[in-house]
Structure formats: C-alpha cells, structure tokens
Amino acid sequence: MKNEQELKDIVKERYTKIAEQEKTLNASSCCGATTPSNKVYNIMMDDYSQTKGYVEDADLGLGCGLPTEFAKIKRGDTVIDLGSGAGNDCFVARNETGSEGKVIGIDFTSIMIEKARRNAEKLGLNNVEFREGDIDAMPVNENVADVIVSNCVLNLVPNKKKVIAEIYRTLKSSGHFSISDVVLVGELPNALKEDAEMYAGCVAGAIQKSDYLELIKNAGFQNINIQKEKPIRIPDDILEKYLSKEEMSAFNTNGAGIFSITVYAEKEATKKQKIQQNSAVVSSQNSCEPNTGCC
C-alpha cells in the first residue's frame, strides 16, 4: 500500500483530469476515475437537477448522495463544503443560507478551485468563497461553521480520523454535519484495494461502515444517525478490468457490499449554551399570556 502523500498525489492528479471531463463520463464510471461503463449510466451520483440552487455548470457528476438535502441549513448559517469541486453543493447551500449566510468550499485541486470561482462570479454571489487546501488540515479557524457538508470525498483521504477531527475543530459548539460517502460491508478483493484507479474512483479508499461510524463517535460527536443509505454496484464491464471471471463471481456472491451513506452528527453544545437552552425552555414553560387563565 502506498503512503499517505502518494495516495493524495494520485487523487490530485486524477481529479485535475476529471475536472475537464464530461459529466456523462464521470457519472458512468467510479467517480470519474475508472473506465466508464457502457451498461449503467449513473453508478454513484444522485440527481440534483430538481434541487433549488442547482447550477448545471458546477455539477461534475462526482457525488454519491445529496447531503445538502439533509443538512438542516438555516438562513444566516455559515456552511463549509469539504471537497467542493466546481461548487455545486456550495451553491445549493447558498440557496438555503441566503445572502445573510456564508459558504466556504475547500478543495485541494487548483483547477477545481478555479472552476468554482468562475461559477460563483457568473452567479454574482459574494458570500460564497473557495479556498485551496487539504480537508485534513483545513484553511479555516476553529468554531467557524454552523454546518459542514461533503459529497463522496472523505473516502479519498488516507487519514480519515484526521479529517473528522478537523470537522470537529471547525464546527461551532452545537453545530452539525451531513456527509455523503462510500463505505464497505465485507472485504474488497485485493485487486481492487491495491489499484490506484479504484482508489481515485471512491472505492478502494472506502473503509468498513462500522469503522467509519466508530471514528465519528470517538471524535466526540453525538446524535449520530444515517439519513440515507443505498447500495452501489460496480458493473461487470468495469470489474472485469481488475478481476477474473471466478473472482467476479465470488465478489458478487460473497455478501460484500459497497454502499453510499449520508451520515448526520452533532457537536456537543458547551455548558454555557446548555444553561442558556435550559433557561429558555424554563422561561417558555413559565410564560403566560394575560387573561388566558393559565396563571
């Protein structure tokens, strides 16, 4: 297995190329990185086209969910999108935050940042910004975001524990995240796990679902729940590039599964916030309108 920096370099190189590919090519392959399938059009991504704030030029077909749909974004919120690509999830989030909020997209591929900034300029949005940097060392101060979203990106990062710690650091107390990602149940064949193309294709870098959720819990997050889950099947015409017929048959029948999950979790409120929240509840319970007979 390659070291962390080598894996990052692979992903950066692949996604620099992917940024200039057609959306249809990205959607018919594994996150745009593998040979496209001629049997299945849309392998991982969900359809954004009916989502408010959707910008077709910013949709590269690289996601595996719709995290903004579940992210509970409110007007005035500050939102961070991890692995923001050409900006699609940022623009959808901006529709929810309104002009009162702020959206920050982070991506470590220069060409993606350039595309996203051009899209934001065309839209005339002055409260959406894009910062180049690693999501395991975010160019953001602590306690900044009300909400963090991400779409099929954490599986590409070698040190997922570090990314989740960064999410915790940059979220405000009582903030939350909604992240769509690829996870495993059962083992991938070695030929898939060891292939650079499959790593950049959001598959080989995925970890066990139970381990993924455990990392989130161990980082200190609360109220963890899976908002959406769907199976992902790699078409045979992609698999046959890596596996023999016997290996393909075994993989398709051994119970191993690749899934897209959208996970929600909250950062615990501070003691001061808890006291304020409890006081507000008590005050509400003790309040009473004049002449209602409740006092």
Image: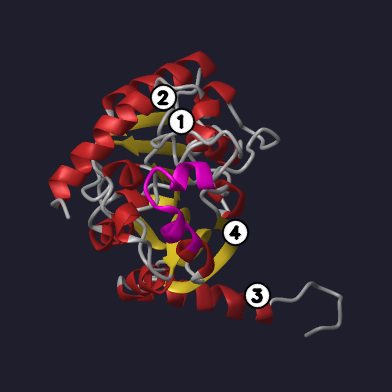
Badges 4 and 2: C-beta atoms under 8 Å apart? no
* Circle nearer the viewer, 1 or 4: 4
For mark 1, does the 10 Å Cα neighbourhood hold few (<14), some (14 to 19), or many (20 or more) residues? many
Q: Mark 2: few, some, or many residues within 10 Å (few <14, many ≥20)?
A: many
Residue type at numbered disc 1:
Gly
Extreme-top residue of the structure: 122
Q: Under tag 3, what secondary structure?
A: helix
Q: Which mark is residue 230?
A: 4
* Picture residue at 55% right of the left edge, 53% below the top: 233
Query: Whole-percent x and y of residue 155?
Result: 36, 53
| Of the image marks 3 and 2, the number of the one nearer the N terminus | 2
Q: Label 2 belongs to which residue?
A: 116
Total numbered circles: 4
**Amino acid identity at mark 2:** Ala
In this picture the colour scheme is secondary structure
Q: What residue appears at the point 57 percent right and 47 percent down from the top-left corner? A: 66
Label 3 to label 1, Cα distance in Å?
41 Å
Label 3 to label 2: alpha-carbon separation: 45 Å
Q: Residues within 10 Å of mark 3 (few under 14, many from 20)?
A: few
Magenta range:
236-249
Which x, y percent locates residue 275?
A: 44, 77
Circle 1 SS class: loop
Residue that label 3 marks: 284
User: Is 59 on the left-hand or right-hand side of 50?
Assistant: left
Distance from disc 1 to disc 2, alpha carbons, whole Å, reads 5 Å
Name the residue rendered at 44%, 75% in the picture. Answer: 274
* Disc 1 + disc 2, Cβ < 8 Å: yes
Q: Quadrant of residue 169?
A: bottom left
Which label lies toward us, 3 or 1? 1
Callouts 3 and 4 close, C-beta under 8 Å: no
